Amino acid sequence: MMSTQGARALKFAAAIALALGATACAKNAGDEASIAGGVGAGYGRGGAATPGSQQDFVVNVGDRVFFESDSSELSSTAQATLDKQARWLQQYARYNFTVEGHADERGTREYNFALGARRAEVTKDYLVARGVPASRVKTISYGKERPVAVCNDISCWS
């Protein structure tokens, strides 16, 4: 049986990930090493995520928002996640980050790159409107080149 999150990922056409790891630009080498320090970086004793670490962001805030198929409109669920992300990013202002736009394999390569770009931009605009400086945010579209889930069945897209 597929998990709810797995099913959700298959049902939605794209995700936006705030990539704080390898694409992070910390203010100094010490911060960068602690963020992109490999498996387990940012975890304290007992497996809890260290506040302000990449794992803290993923575990306690959420690093993805999902869109309906062929849409770049933010749902109320996506907005709630982005509100949490904006608060976290304001608290831990040392991070620059990249918003990634993705799409599924349907449609042309060009169309899906444009869709991914719209999704990334709408997400960036939402975060900026909530006080995250635009200078900290880069966007990239992967279109259908890096789908969230690979599935060629109609049930994945409904």
Image (cartoon, grey):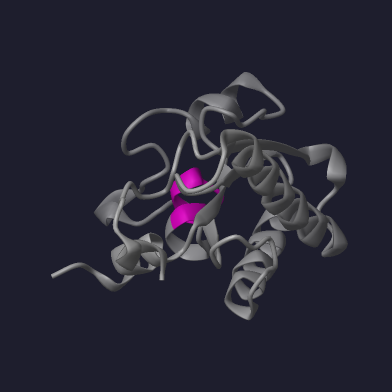
Residue at the farthest top position: 29
Whether residue 133 sits left or right of residue 16 in the image: it is right
Whether residue 120 sits left or right of residue 158 in the image: it is right
Q: Residue at x 64, y 35 (%)?
A: 110
Q: Residue at x 61, y 70 (%)?
A: 78
Report x, y in % for residue 108.
57, 39
Whether residue 37 sits left or right of residue 82 in the image: it is left
Report x, y in % for residue 5.
34, 67
Picture layout, residue 124 above or below residue 112: below
In this picture, which residue range is highlighted in magenta?
52-58
Report x, y in % for residue 125.
82, 56
Picture layout, residue 94 above or below residue 123: above
Tell me where residue 32 sits by quadrant. top right
Quadrant of the image for the C terminus?
A: bottom left
Of residue 87 and residue 51, the one placed in the foreground of this image is 87
Quadrant of the image for the N terminus?
A: bottom left
Of residue 109 and residue 8, the one placed in the foreground of this image is 109
- Can residue 51 be seen here? The reply is no
Tell me where residue 154 sits by quadrant. bottom left
- Can residue 55 be seen here? The reply is yes
Mostly what secondary structure, the magenta segment?
helix
Residue 106: in magenta span? no
Report x, y in % for residue 132.
81, 53
Picture layout, residue 157 above or below residue 139: below
